[in-house]
Image: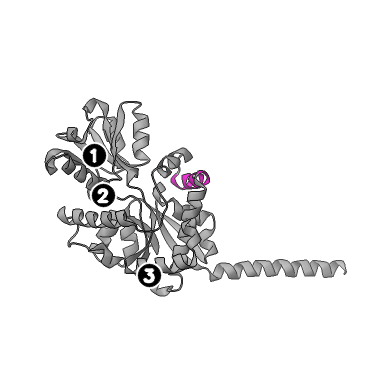
């Protein structure tokens, strides 16, 4: 074969590969994925960066979000197609009839929440919280857990002075002495404890009282436009969760890039989380307790029965479980 013919053949092969790649990229379903800047949603980001969602036919554009409330707003406004929401923010979405549904869990782990106390506040048991100033974000799982801890200790609801805070600033409030304790989550609990160098300690973890992690949410509009791809989205998440479970150190390094923190900080959070996509009995009970708590606190306009909002979840889980049982290993 002559030189000119060889060059033509090589050019044709290269063009074929490039064209095939372009077509493949064009055939992928575009998705705007709102991912919270918290390690609990690591499977979302890691699965995207490792090409797992692409393998299932998705062209993912990541949009960082700060809170579950912001995720609810972005989904409802059509600014993102997928996102993740904590247990409490998802219940709020159900109560206010926002246009998206739950299709899987992205993580579990109530012990990622806890109560950290200053040692000079002399708090050695839940009863010692009486009269203390506790930083806690209103309407969150730690707030609900704190309520249950107080009740179990035989204290009235107003026994503690709740100081409204967010997860990012409550550590500084504890360090400076603005509060005696904080009801927060990882990695902020561990980071604050480290910064206080022996002057603070964990009073208790809240896994006995509330469920951590949360749910994979998809807008009704996207699901209606892509009815055959919803199960694929869930399958991609399940495989991503499995990858995180099987490769925690590498997953922590990837997630740390997204969060712009040290990998060890992500590993701290991983210690308290389980990337399991199914709803177990404890999660079901926690969902109802959360709904009851939010209704009692008048943080939702109407009572909610979580089971009524999980019909699509159960349908998709059955479908994906039958097709990809290995992802639950």
Which comes sooner in the sequence, label 1 or label 2? Answer: 1
Position of 318 compared to 17: left or right?
left
Residue 3 location, x and y as percent?
Answer: 86, 66
- Say above or below: 107 vs 315: above
Contact check, label 3 and label 2, Cβ < 8 Å? no
Residue identified by numbered label 2? 140
Q: Which element carries disc 2, helix, strand or loop? A: loop
Which comes sooner in the sequence, label 1 or label 3? Answer: 1
**What residue span does the magenta drawing correspond to?**
249-259
Residue 5 location, x and y as percent?
Answer: 83, 70
Position of 38 compared to 18: left or right?
left
Which image quarter holds the N terminus? bottom right
Quadrant in the rendering for residue 177: top left
Q: Can I make out residue 50 in this image?
A: yes
Residue depicted at x 26% and y 32%: 117
Q: Nearer the viewer, mark 3 or mark 2?
A: 3
Residue 138 location, x and y as percent?
Answer: 22, 48
Which comes sooner in the sequence, label 3 or label 2? Answer: 2
Q: Nearer the viewer, residue 286 or 230?
A: 286
Residue identified by numbered label 1? 135
Residue depicted at x 42% and y 52%: 275
- Say above or below: 209 vs 89: above
Q: How is the image coloured?
A: one colour
| Circle on res. 315 | 3
Quadrant in the rendering for residue 20: bottom right
């Amino acid at each position: 074969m002559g030189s000119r013919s060889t060059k033509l053949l090589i050019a044709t092969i290269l063009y074929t590969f490039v064209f095939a790649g372009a077509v493949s990229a064009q055939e992928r379903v575009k998705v705007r994925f709102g991912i919270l800047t918290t390690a609990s949603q690591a499977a979302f980001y890691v699965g995207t960066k490792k090409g797992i969602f692409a393998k299932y036919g998705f062209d993912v554009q990541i949009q960082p979000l700060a809170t579950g409330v912001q995720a609810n707003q972005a989904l409802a406004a059509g600014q993102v197609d997928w996102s993740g929401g904590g247990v409490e923010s998802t219940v709020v979405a159900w109560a206010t009839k926002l246009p998206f549904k739950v299709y899987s869990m992205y993580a579990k782990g109530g012990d990622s929440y806890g109560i950290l106390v200053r040692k000079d506040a002399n708090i050695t048991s839940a009863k010692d919280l009486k009269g203390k100033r506790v930083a806690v974000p209103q309407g969150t799982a730690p707030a609900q857990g704190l309520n249950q801890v107080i009740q179990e200790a035989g204290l009235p609801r107003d026994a503690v002075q709740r100081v409204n805070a967010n997860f990012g600033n409550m550590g500084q409030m504890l360090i400076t002495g603005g509060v005696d304790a904080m009801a927060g989550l990882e990695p902020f609990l561990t980071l604050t404890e480290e910064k206080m160098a022996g002057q603070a300690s964990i009073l208790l973890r809240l896994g006995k009282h509330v469920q951590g992690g949360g749910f994979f949410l998809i807008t009704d509009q996207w699901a209606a436009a892509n009815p055959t791809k919803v199960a694929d989205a869930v399958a991609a998440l399940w495989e991503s969760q499995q990858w995180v479970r099987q490769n925690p150190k590498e997953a922590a390094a990837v997630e740390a890039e997204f969060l712009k923190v040290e990998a060890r900080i992500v590993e701290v959070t991983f210690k308290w989380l389980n990337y399991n996509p199914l709803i177990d009995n404890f999660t079901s009970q926690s969902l109802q307790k959360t709904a009851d708590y939010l209704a009692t606190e008048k943080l939702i306009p109407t009572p909610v029965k979580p089971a009524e909002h999980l019909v699509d979840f159960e349908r998709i889980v059955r479908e994906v479980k039958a097709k990809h049982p290995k992802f639950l290993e």
